[in-house]
Image: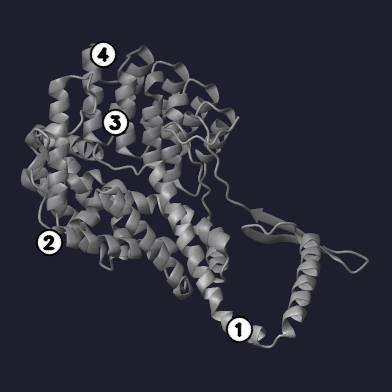
Amino acid sequence: MTCDLARQSFSLYLYGELDFQQEQELEQHLDGCAVCRVSLEDERNLHGALDAVACQPSAELLQASRRELRLTVGQLASRRRGRWDWLHAWFNQVSFWRPLGAVALVAVGFFGARVWDAVSGTPPAVLRVRNLQSSPQGHVQLVLEEVRQKTVHGDLDNDQIRAMLLAAASDPSDPALRARTLDFLKAQSEHSDVRQTLLQALRRDPNPGVRLKALEALTPFAADPETRRALTEVLLSDENPGVRTMSVDLLTGEMDTETIGVLQELIVRESNPYIRQKSLKALREVNASIETF
Amino acid sequence: MLTGKSEASTVFVQAQASPTDEADLIRAAQRGDAAAFETLVQSYDQAVLRLACNLLRNEQDAFDIYQETFLRVYRNLNQFRFDCSFKTWLYRIVTNLCLDQLRKKKVRKEEPTTVATASGEVDRMAVVPEANPLGDPQRNLMSAQLQDRIERVLAELTPRERMVFEMRHYQGMRLRAIGEVLGTTEEAAKNCLFRATQKMRSALGDFV
């Protein structure tokens, strides 16, 4: 691979969009080309600079958008219901139907409410039958599952809010929500339950973006023994080079004998030349051997 | 105690439906269940708003795109037949609306570099407030210049390049999913992303 070709593929490489062979060729080239390694670092900086202009819509804009949409959809729904107006006009023309209709509506409302209350109480947003049994009297007993949506507001140091954030941080259905949650939790990382959640996300979250957020939040605790244990595990086993790069940076910020051993092991098994280079540099700085004996 | 404050430190906890729940929600909304429709909207509306804000760089435009997107979803939900994911269907709507808006913006006259004030015309950049007035002034200037340059480069990309870049870089979508949303192949989306990043590198290379 030539330097020109290598440089052209840096961006797709950083996005993880090169196929296996292209990535292999690029990494082999980077292994032997210091100039391209520097260029790759420039490209990484460019990606970082682009992150800085990301636009996050305000909570006020989101609320205003939701309010307006609710209003418009409500109007559209009532217009749809208005298609039955011809029936209403006919009722108005035939005068004796009006008291009769009113009595019928009251009766339907009364009996309907009784029946509905007996079955399920207030209508939920989403309702699913989970189990059912018959009774000797011929009744049916249903076990229902309800899903409701609720918005809560509160400060980050509120215990209830924190408990909900901790639950959202491990919601398996949405990595973006987990990443955003860790961003919020970052400010609360002095709490041990928050720290445990961050460590768990770093070790187990399937999404590399979420793991990077966890690393970012754990940066002030890089000297803490439990955090260093997690960083070591991640450095030796995480499949994402970005996560491994950040872990090596945090670990080498404070070199101890254990870290030296980890870096020596890493040099043997690490496939990414950039991370290997970083480890070598850190070992050289403390005059440590680059091999295990 | 929970309060109703809406300050910077306020959090909005959003429930997210799992795929099975989502199918149930869609069916309920198709039957006219307003609460199900609202839950469905709120599962995706932050992402839609962020996409529109990032692409159009204007809160009012993003607000309009949000309204138009979800009204189209409301009007056409009965035609949704589950032959692709709801997210792909929704993103097709929002990306088409944003592409139209970007194309309109492209043909509009560019904003002047100066702005009229009581004391005469001044450069736009001179009236932009500093991000961190207590920080290193040279660094702040550098970062403001870089930000301005990035905004300009993004504005110079074609609407399609801009869209692919936005979805890959800021929304974290894979190129295959982007191709599906834009009705093209993964390879074509890759070429588009390649062109976008090449343009940005040549315009910003000396800055970073």
Marks 1 and 3, the one that precedes in the sequence: 1
Marks 4 and 3 on same chain: yes
Mark 1 belongs to which subunit?
A: A
Mark 3 belongs to which subunit?
A: A
Mark 4 belongs to which subunit?
A: A
Which amino acid, mark 1? Answer: Ala
Residue at image point 21% right, 16% down: A284
Q: Residues within 10 Å of mark 3 (few under 14, many from 20)?
A: some
Residue that mark 1 sits on: A89
Mark 2 belongs to which subunit?
A: B
| Residue B208 visible in rendering | no
Task: Give the CA distance from mark 1 to mark 2.
Answer: 51 Å
| Residue A57 visible in rendering | yes
Residue that mark 2 sits on: B107
Which amino acid, mark 4? Answer: Ala
Give the number of the mark in front: 1 or 2: 1
Numbered label attached to residue A288: 4
Q: Residues within 10 Å of mark 2 (few under 14, many from 20)?
A: few
